[in-house]
């Protein structure tokens, strides 16, 4: 039986896609809902994505937004290409 839990990689991809779909900028609470995570777990993932320069944190007044970077966009493009190849060969990713 397949494990229904997502891998860390799948969670990183879900976060990046959520931010990308929101015109590249999103608040933490919205990421929680779109990526199906808790606030406490999201912090760990955001820190990793920021330390690897896939997203940046922007403060605007009292609000904080997370913005996808060119590197993050490039990563998602690579993931999409790899998924296309895997799908063509009938291999699940």
Image (tube, grey):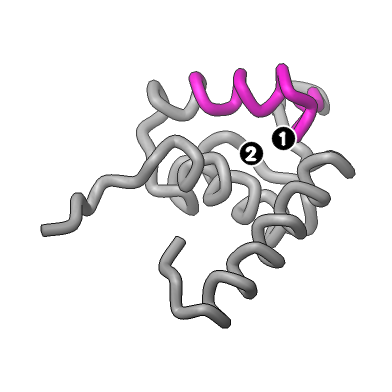
Which label number is shown at residue 66?
Answer: 1
Quarter of image, res 66: top right
Whichever of labels 2 and 1 marks the residue nearer the N terminus, that label is 2
Span of residues in magenta: 44-59
Mark 2 residue crowding within 10 angstroms, few (<14) / some (14–19) / many (20+): some
Task: Compare residues 51 and 57 and report the one nearer the observer.
Answer: 51
Number of numbered tags placed on the structure image:
2
At 63% from the left and 72% from the top, the residue drawn is: 85
User: Measured from the top left, where is residue 54 in percent x and y?
Assistant: 75, 34
Identify whether 76 is placed above or below 64. Answer: below
Task: Please give the label number shown on residue 92.
Answer: none
- Residue at (82%, 50%) from the top-left corner? 74
Whether residue 47 is situated above or below residue 22 in the rendered picture: above
Is 3 positioned to the left or the right of 6 in the image? left
Q: Secondary structure at mark 2?
A: strand
Dot 1: element: strand
Return the residue found at the far right. Answer: 70
Above or below — where is 23 with respect to 15?
below
Q: Quadrant of residue 21?
A: bottom right
User: Marks 1 and 2: in contact by CB < 8 Å?
Assistant: yes
Q: Whole-Å distance between the Cαs marked 2 and 1?
A: 6 Å
Residue that mark 2 sits on: 27
Across and down, in percent, residue 50 comes to: 71, 23
- Residue placed at 53% from the left, 50% from the top? 14
């Amino acid at each position: 039986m397949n494990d229904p839990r997502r891998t860390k990689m799948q969670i990183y991809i879900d976060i990046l896609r959520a931010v990308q779909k929101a015109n590249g900028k999103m608040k933490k609470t919205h990421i929680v809902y779109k990526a199906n995570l808790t606030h406490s777990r999201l912090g760990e993932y955001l820190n990793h994505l920021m330390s690897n320069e896939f997203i940046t944190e922007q403060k605007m007044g009292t609000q904080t937004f997370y913005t996808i970077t060119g590197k993050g966009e490039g990563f998602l493009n690579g993931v999409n290409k790899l998924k296309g190849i895997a799908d063509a060969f009938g291999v699940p990713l």
